[in-house]
Image: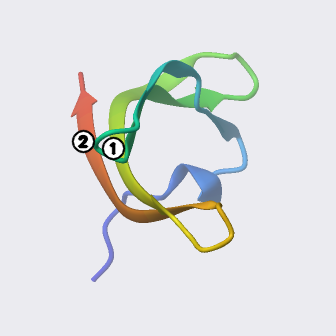
């Protein structure tokens, strides 16, 4: 049994927009946080079909080459229907 819900990427008449609203870096806690809004937008009209606020918290470590590596990511969603 399948639901009637399709991912937006499967609907060619819409596109995804991910504007970044805020970004923070906490070097002591090895965390990076990003607040963004995911928008599904109808291509023909520009109308926003769905908008979801996302707060993403990344934990990271520095590898032996000095590069940042994400060790954990937590995503928190908020939507208004």
Q: 16 or 74, which lies in front? A: 74
Task: Name which residue lies at 38% across and 50% down.
Answer: 58
Q: Is residue 57 left or right of residue 70?
A: left
Label 1 crowd (10 A; few <14 / some 14-19 / many >=20):
some
Residue 45: where, in percent of width, then height? 70, 16
Question: Which label sits on residue 57?
Answer: 1
Q: How many marks?
A: 2
Residue mark closest to the camera, 2 vs 1: 1
Q: Secondary structure at mark 2?
A: strand
Residue 49: where, in percent of width, then height? 48, 26
The residue at which mark 2 appears reads as: 76
The answer to whether one can see residue 28 in this image is yes
Q: Quadrant of residue 63?
A: bottom right
Residue 68: where, in percent of width, then height? 57, 58
Task: Name which residue lies at 31% across and 67% down.
Answer: 3
Task: Name which residue lies at 68% across and 70% down.
Answer: 65
Q: Quadrant of residue 17?
A: top right
Q: Is residue 38 left or right of residue 41?
A: left
Task: Name which residue lies at 71% across and 40% down.
Answer: 13
Q: 9 or 3, which lies in front? A: 9
The reply to whether the C-beta atoms of the residues labelled 2 and 1 are less than 8 Å apart is: yes
Q: Quadrant of residue 50?
A: top left
Where is the C terminus found, in terms of image quarters? top left
Where is the N terminus found, in terms of image quarters? bottom left
């Amino acid at each position: 049994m399948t639901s009637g819900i399709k991912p937006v990427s499967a609907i060619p008449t819409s596109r995804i927009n991910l504007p970044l609203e805020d970004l923070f870096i906490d070097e002591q806690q090895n965390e990076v946080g990003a607040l963004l809004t995911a928008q599904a937008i109808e291509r023909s009209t520009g109308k926003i079909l769905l908008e979801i606020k996302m707060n993403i918290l990344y934990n990271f470590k520095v590898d032996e080459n000095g590069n940042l590596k994400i060790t954990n990511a937590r995503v928190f969603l908020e939507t208004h229907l």
